[in-house]
Amino acid sequence: GQQVMQIPQYQHVQEGEDFTTYCNSSTTLSNIQWYKQRPGGHPVFLIQLVKSGEVKKQKRLTFQFGEAKKNSSLHITATQTTDVGTYFCAPEGGSYIPTFGRGTSLIVHP
Amino acid sequence: EAQVTQNPRYLITVTGKKLTVTCSQNMNHEYMSWYRQDPGLGLRQIYYSMNVEVTDKGDVPEGYKVSRKEKRNFPLILESPSPNQTSLYFCASSLTGTGTYGYTFGSGTRLTVV
């Protein structure tokens, strides 16, 4: 599967602060998906990005796909305790086999 | 309700005793996949299936078997479990292999091999 590096591995924030996680690949990606896994839960699909430079928003979440389609980011504005969990990117490199990054665990302190 | 159902949720077994984890989806999805999740390693793909009777190895297939005799079911078989297969396992499905509509995950099976 497609290899990617997801950073940071962990992020502690105070409630109300912003949060960003990055997903980087050394090769061009066909598309990339993002998932959220709550503690003790299972991954839940958030969004898929396909086009170069694409930006999509879901309320306080902003997803970006790089111009070269080698990286992506998820930004959360004004975090809330409900945002706690692990965020995974899952890129596809053209073989239609998604590979998950190691995830970024977000801890929000009230 | 559209869902992926895994059973059992929790399983403790002994080394060498064959076991099967079942996975069933009711969404008529073509693509199904098994992952294992270990601390610090994220989700690693074990096997996947693009359709009935079509299966292929993922990144960590050693020690596992799968079958896809029906579209809705994709069981994971451990012929001779070992302690290093202690992990959290997830089954996932998607309408197509490209995941355009995202992957739906089951609730997970926590396996302990002693």
Image (cartoon, coloured by chain):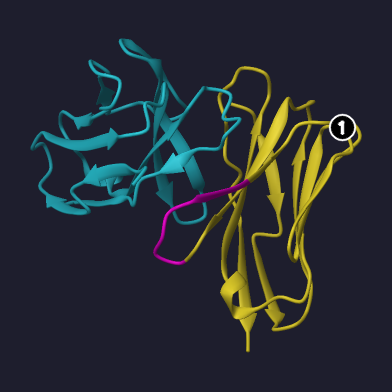
Chain colours: A yellow, B cyan
Q: Which residues are magenta?
A: A39-46
Hey, which quadrant is residue B85 in on the image?
A: top left
Q: Which residue is at 16% across, 52% downward?
A: B11
Residue B15 horizontal side relative to residue A108, left or right? left
Q: Which residue is mark 1?
A: A52
- Residue B43, percent across and down? 48, 44
Question: Which amino acid, by three-letter code, is at mark 1?
Answer: Ser
Looking at this view, is A55 or A69 the one in front?
Answer: A55
Q: Report the magenta stretch's main SS.
A: loop
Task: Name above or below for residue A32 compared with residue B57.
Answer: below
Q: How many marks?
A: 1
Looking at this view, is A45 or A20 the one in front?
Answer: A45
**Furthest residue in direction front, as rendered:** B1
Q: Which residue is at 57% across, 34% downward?
A: B101
Residue A8 horizontal side relative to residue B56, left or right? right
Q: Which residue is at 80% across, 40% downward?
A: A71
- Residue A8, percent across and down? 71, 59
Q: Which residue is at 51% across, 48% downward?
A: B41
- A55 drawn magenta: no
